[in-house]
Amino acid sequence: MSEALGRVVATERKPNTPHEFHFWTAIDSPVGIGTIVRVDGSHPMDGQIPHIYGIIVEGFSYTDLQSPMHDVLGHDGLPTTAGYAATERAEIRLYTAAVLRQMPEEPLQPVPMGQVFLADERDVQVALRMDSYLRDGASTGIPVGVYRAGATDAVIYLDADFLLGPEAAHLNITGVSGLATKTSAVEWLLASLFKHFPEEKGSIAAVCFNVKGPDLCYLDQPGHIEEADKALYEKLEVEPEPFDKVQYFAPYTAKGLTLNTFRNNEALLDNVVPLTWGLREVLQFAEVLLNKDDVDAKADALIDFIKENIVDKEFRDPVLTKTHKVQSFADLDAWFRDVLQGMERKDGESWRTHHVATIRKVRNRLSNISTRCAGLVTDSGDVSDLPFGSFEDRTVYVVDVANLEEDAQDLIFARIVSKLREHLERRDLGVKHLVVFVDELNKYAPGDGADTYVRKMLLDIAERGRYLGLVLFSAQQFRSQVHRRVVGNSGTALFGRMDPDELTTPGYAVLSPATRTKLATLEKGQLMIRHPHFTQPIFVRFPRPSVMQGREGAERYPQASDVPLDAAILRALRPLDPTITLSWVQEITALFTEEEVLKARNATLLARPANVKGYFESQFRKIIPTQTPPRPMAATIKTAPENDPYGF
Amino acid sequence: MLVSNSGPDAASRAALNLLIEKLPGLSPIDGGSSAEPMTSADPPILRSAQIVEGSSLRAVKVPDVARDTVSGFGAFLDGAQKIQVLGHQHGIPVVLGTISAAVRVRVNRRLVTWGHQPPRVERAMYLPLRYLPALRPDVVAALAKSAWRVVDTSTADRNGEYPSMHPAVLVERAIRAVDQQREELEDRLAEAWCALGEAPLFIDGGISRTPGVAASTCAVGVIKSHRTLYVEGDALKVVMGLKMGERSSVFRVSPRSRSAVLSWYLRQRAAGGHDAMWGLVRVEVAECDRPTERADEISRWVLAETSPLALPDGRWDKMSYGIRDCEEFLRAIS
């Protein structure tokens, strides 16, 4: 049994309560803010010695000095002479601890006087009620980090039932930008989840939206791990390796030649899939891109008419010159053109109750989408999408929207999350549990501002997602500025180093001043955790993720710049077939337009055929190469004999 | 020496309950009343002493005093007492006395309790048995067997006279007895320290009560009260006129029934604006061959102990911080 490090004290002015107690320690005791301690009561209650577990939330230090002036006088006003004093003043280290748990739990009484011990690993489990979900054979514990104090090195587990549902769900992480704490914590936690999520609870995957920088672009590449982190990995029973299965999705750039992602270096393209959508996919989420000023009731009615009656259907009308089957933005524009020309011919102001002005407005707005979301939305209608229905267990799907315009980001987010939700409702996504990671919640789900489609979706996930197995891992710099219902529904909250201004907001008033100070000065790799089982926030240390960091990845695998068409095709196809050469690409594509070549590339990437060369080649219409007819040999002009001027 | 007068505590309540049981008719005093320390019955006096450093008493500037002077004291000894009048039976006072003493050792500039001899706390009932006939011998024996030692404060003095029944006289008797027992407790600790011959011990008070301590080079007594001044005539002027950092010549103090020791006065703080005794202490050490060097060395140590200040204690001008620490410690445990 370890030695006592302190004694509980209570005075009339500073009494102990059932939820808080005070104790003093030696000056050099290895305790501080966040340390977990155990109090052993002196007198048994119902035949049982009470044990109280608490976490230090405040510390005080003072001497027997009654006034600072006495110290000044004692040293003649010269601070340098203070070190010569023969004796140091008696000094106290007095701590306040918040009760984590009392054993026995009933009757709940004020904390008794007793000796205070540093909590060991077993004590930490009991104090945080982890013993209820770390049972042998039925453990639902997910290691989140290591709690350290003195000689104690205890693994802190989150309860999977409260992290991924059904009891509670969702995780929110807050921290200042620039320390990579938020992204690192999520990367680490996903690795831990994939390793420790109980098999019997089913499959699990993650969809991560990379909204800024290259941080999530190298999850499958090994990173540099220091010895201290290796020890943490060993303690936490997670292999320090990058993610085994990762798929990346990114739209093309506006030109359509290269993928619009930091991960478009040729060496990394083998698991990068283009993300392209056509009219059908976009029209369903038109309201994401069209604001309320654009879409009044009349315009909304016309859009609904188009969705119901035009798209993917053969449409005839007396006003039209031909039958239309609209499958792409190009088709839609042709349809609009035909309708408007027909109306002009008839000199009519409305068609099927839709006013010409409304038709022109809707045409303008919808046609504009393919321009605003160029690279994502294709005129041609080609679709390359996430593998909805065939999601794989323990796989990370990263959707890189970092370089996209805000409209395109919103569209991608809204559609993917909606599709995930649909599939999870039907239980046919391919996995039972899905984690969706969204950073920059300040932007996507602000507490104030317009009620956007994306915010509504995030609220919906936060409030109902856990019943479906759809779990939101979200992050932001300022929790106070995120919609209350999003953060409020997060059963688990992580806090990295915090902005001091943020800590002054009312949401942090429940934390002691010392805890807030610690939060403002947390080191990289440290987190404060709130979890439904923990009655007080706990500080832990987590290992650096074993994946390549964004900055390092960007240096090692520089982003590809725009290249000529043939080089872009080579770069796209070579991961599928390394034997493809630039000269082969040039030979095949020489006679075709850029649009045709890109269409062939997209089709090949989508199909991923065994015979890449043959498939790619087959996408082009047969054109007999023009052959230059041989020039007829000109007849030799006969020369007249010198002596016969008429001799022809 | 700490004299505290706090209200009733668990010990006094237990004692009172015991007495109520054994002494029918006892009238408890609500909360117990504290007896103030008794000022000596003897009037303040001047007494001559034999000068052993030079031919006349003079002021000597303590040499080599600097801010970084290192004190040689390794420990501090002090005692404390608490006297509570718990009640009375027809005016005859029943007194509870608590005495304590401790040695606090300096380790890495911090003071901790001496491990060799734990601090002592003793409690006793001071009862004038002669005037409390209800307390039959068997009852007293029973009390003595319990946690409470009984001290009879109505015994005859050396002239064979018993104290009167005047309650004030009986309380005075009790106070003297407590005082004496506290001194004995301090002496036992001092003897134990000196027997081990560890580092020099700073004792609050004189060292001449026990021969072993009075002869030990480990013991240094520092006296803050000056009811008896060991100077007369011009020597008194010299002592009263000592400036900060000055000491008097060394003289020998040879009280009756006590051991002879060497002594000198030392001014620890400038007395300007204060009374003449401000910052004045008298130091006692064992007899030695080179009193001048010894007095200079010990004076340097005592001056070094003036920092940190013993504030907020009212006697901070004369008290060293180590002694204040002892008193605070004893207040906490007794």
Image: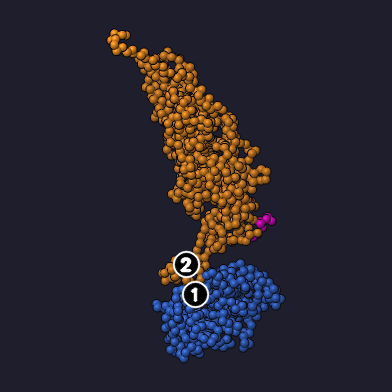
Chain of the residue that carries numbered disc 2 in the rendered image: A
Furthest residue in direction front, as rendered = A643
Q: Position of residue A476 (x, y in %)?
A: 47, 43
Along the horizontal axis of the image, is A337 left or right of B318? left
Q: For the point 43% across and 82% down, which residue is it?
A: B61
**Quadrant position of the N terminus of chain B in the picture:** bottom right
- Crowding around mark 2 (Cα neighbors within 10 Å: few <14, some 14 to 19, many 20+) is few
Along the horizontal axis of the image, is B166 left or right of A408? right
Which of the pair B325/B174 is nearer the observer? B325
Along the horizontal axis of the image, is B274 left or right of A154? left
Q: What's the mark number on residue B70?
A: 1
Q: How many marks?
A: 2
Q: The disc labelled 2 sits on which kind of residue? A: Gln
Q: Secondary structure at mark 2?
A: loop
Q: Secondary structure at mark 1?
A: loop
Q: Start and end of the magenta stretch?
A: A42-49
Q: The disc labelled 1 sits on which kind of residue? A: Val
Q: Position of residue A632 (x, y in %)?
A: 39, 14
In the depicted structure, whether residue A22 falls above or below residue A335: below
Q: Position of residue A47 (x, y in %)?
A: 69, 56
In the rendered image of the structure, the colour used to display chain B is blue
Chain of the residue that carries numbered disc 1 in the rendered image: B
User: Which residue is under mark 2?
Assistant: A66
In the depicted structure, whether residue A166 falls above or below residue A348: below
Q: For the point 66% across and 46% down, which residue is it?
A: A135
Q: Quadrant of residue A298?
A: top left
In the rendered image of the structure, the colour used to display chain A is orange
